[in-house]
Amino acid sequence: MVAIIERREIRDFDWLTTMLAVAIAAFGIWQIHNALPSESYWTKQIIGLLIALAAFAVVAVSDYRRIIDAAPIFYVIGLLLLFLVLTPLGVEVNGQRAWVRLPVVGQFQPSEFAKIPTILMLAKYFGARKGGNLQFKEVFIGGLIMAAPLGLIMLEPDLGQAITYIPIFGAVLLLSAIKIRYIVVAILAAVILVPTAWYVGVKSGKIKRYQQERVNVVLDPDSADPRGYGYHTVQSMITVGKGGLSGIRGGAETSQSVLKFLPEPQTDFIFAVTAENTGFIGCISLLLAYALLLSRLIDGAREASDRPAMLVIMSIATAMTFQIFINIGMTLGFLPVIGVPLPLMSAGLSALLTTFIAIGFVVSVRMRRFVN
């Protein structure tokens, strides 16, 4: 058995996907260092990458079918971690209670990790279907699976992370042959409910002033106060513009992030740091690397030998694409700042670990695509 595993690793292990992910993560560490060279974020990210690679290896060599079979267990663990955030074990950072402190691991963001169990649970449920269009009962049960983690995240509240769960559910429904009329109803409901929820949230105080202003900055850029609520967006756009074609010359003496003009350069605005230091060429190269990585994920879904694995991989690819779009949109000023990290690039163990676990699952599926 050991010999078979070794041969499979040599023959079918997805080295290209693995190397792409590691290369983007290494590039991210370089940009974190460029952003804050005198602080320890980049050294912590190196340690985080080593931990993430260990988790990746464990998942990659595991049989993905057993992982999917254990989806209910992982799902319950994910919910328990989300619940812990709401207890005294929860940790508040920058006015947001979205972290929990665990033994050995330290500070951890459950809303990032819980994406994987949620994806697995949805794939297990919808992957067991015999075929045909989805029935209302199936959509409703799937909605309950998604509602549990989403509800706990909204109680934190963490609007940014909550939004990243929605495309996952949409991808699973579309791939499971949802009826067109359900899509129309969902769109109409969103058109009615989103403005209503915004109005109620503003009136009740659930949507904070700074959150309102971040949306207003996008809707009416000319009204942005460059020293007030529009500061993040304005500084990010200045940082991106300074990069030019190939990046700034002069290093720390002219860097927006090093000089502390750009807030949270190691997380929310790591793409702005990349634009400043590597310019248009560096940004295009990063986007091409992302495009190649996402194409490898889609190829993995196409080659999957069963439906649940395909649903998991496509959900992962959808979530990653959405986060890339949202983060870069925040950086360039055409989306509000909601604290969504750039996959593999932004500093933080939780996001890095979750992404490498997800990629490990994809590699596990590809390794076993020829096995009955």
Image: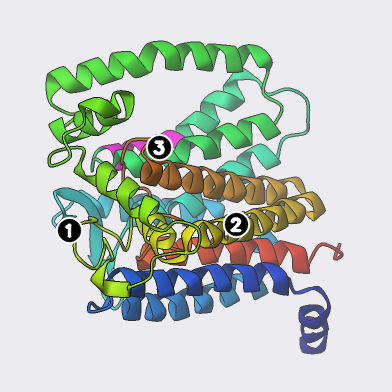
Which is more N-terminal, label 2 or label 3?
A: 3
Task: Report whether 370 appears left or right of 182.
Answer: right
Q: The residue under label 2 is which amino acid type?
A: Tyr
Query: Would you say residue 152 sits in the magenta stretch?
Result: yes
Q: Is residue 39 above or below residue 187?
A: below
Quadrant occupied by the C terminus = bottom right
**Label 2: how many residues lie within 10 Å, few (<14), some (14-19) or many (20+)?**
many
Residue 233 can be seen in this image: yes
Q: CA–CA distance between discs 3 and 2? A: 21 Å
Type of residue at label 1?
Val
Q: What residue does disc 1 label?
A: 91
Going 21% across and 38% down the picture, which residue do you hit? 230
User: Which residue lies under the disc numbered 3?
Assistant: 163
Q: Which residues are magenta?
A: 146-154
Q: Which mark is residue 290?
A: 2
**Residue drawn at 28 percent across, 42 percent down:** 233
Query: SS of the residue at dot 1?
Result: strand
Question: Please, which residue is most extreme toward the bottom here?
Answer: 3
Task: Establish if 307 lies above or below 39.
Answer: above
Look at the magenta stretch and give its main secondary structure: helix
x, y percentage for residue 236? 31, 49
